[in-house]
Amino acid sequence: MQNQINLVAFGPEHIDEAIALSRAESWPHRREDWAMAQKLSAGAVATNSDGRVTGTTFMTPFGNDYATINMVIVDKSMRGLGLGRRLMERAFELAGERPLRLIATKEGLPLYEKLGFVATGTIRQHQGEVGRVELPEGVEDMQAGDVEAVRALDREAYNADRSALLDTLLDLGQIAVVRKGDGGDEVDAWAAIRPFGRGEVIGPVIAPDLETAWALIAYFASSRQGSFLRIDTGSETGLAPLLSEIGLAHVGGGVAMRRPLIEDAGEPKRKVFALVSQALG
């Protein structure tokens, strides 16, 4: 059976069948969400002898600093045949020498552990229809002159070149910032929101502390009462009870993993309070 499966480069022509695979897993990704991931990534699909897509994987590089492996799906009828491992090995080839990160589902965790990934934390997925949220003070829409400051804060938080991802967020979404001091010009924190799945997703949220991170989230949420929002946050951030209070329930998540395990160099001044998505980190 395995010999009848071919791995080929993921192209736009595969998106429709990829959507079918993700829907079978109850993932909310729209065509636009798959297209965004494909634009930022190198990927592969597994096809059977009839040309039907039976598996997918993406490797999303952030310069040469690291890469994420994401959108790893194997058709239910093809599980237990080693296809997941083959897709991961192809992602390794695409990544080259880059250190790797991913968010593991419960189903994928055993394979990733066998392949040398080590758990570094847990991610909580919160989502739902937003309740009433007060508009916070001190948060505003990003101005054109803030782009380089936003890029610098992102690099400080992630220790990586994520320029391509930030360009995509600028094109597709809205970015809000908090400035230092009263009436200051220097950007101290920022967050993005964009269409995704059933509604919108907030992330990343990059801030020096929980209070500032929450102000950024509240800024977006305050104008979206009754709308569907999603936020993926680390279990250690302290955001979970605040998100639950405004109607964003904890509905799942995953395990953050790295290969090899490389400790971050010191505590960054800016922390990542919410991810762009579980796929892209």
Image (spheres, rainbow, N blue to C red):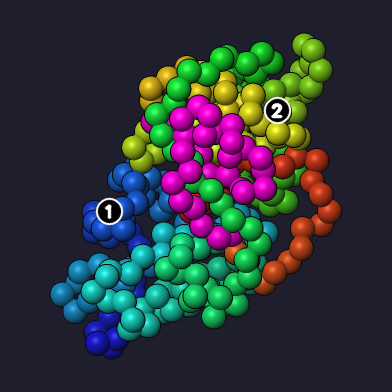
Question: Where is residue 97 shown, x and y percent of the image?
Answer: 63, 72
Q: Residue at x 75, y 44 (%)?
A: 156
Q: Which mark is residue 23?
A: 1
Outermost residue, right side: 266
Where 274 sits versus 266, above or below? Answer: above
Task: Give the SS element for disc 1.
Answer: helix
Foreground residue among 13 and 69: 69
Mark 2 residue type: Thr
The magenta span reads 228-256
Q: Which mark is residue 145?
A: none
Question: Where is residue 205 shown, x and y percent of the image?
Answer: 62, 36
In the picture, measured across the screen, residue 171 lies left or right of residue 100, that is left
Foreground residue among 202 and 242: 242
Residue 242 within the magenta-colored segment of the rendering:
yes
In the picture, measured across the screen, residue 273 lies left or right of residue 195, that is right
Q: Which residue position is annotated with label 2?
A: 212
Name the quadrant containing residue 151: top right
Please say whether residue 158 is visible from this viewpoint: yes
Question: Where is residue 267 shown, x and y percent of the image?
Answer: 81, 49
Dividing the image into 4 quarters, which one contains the N terminus?
A: bottom left
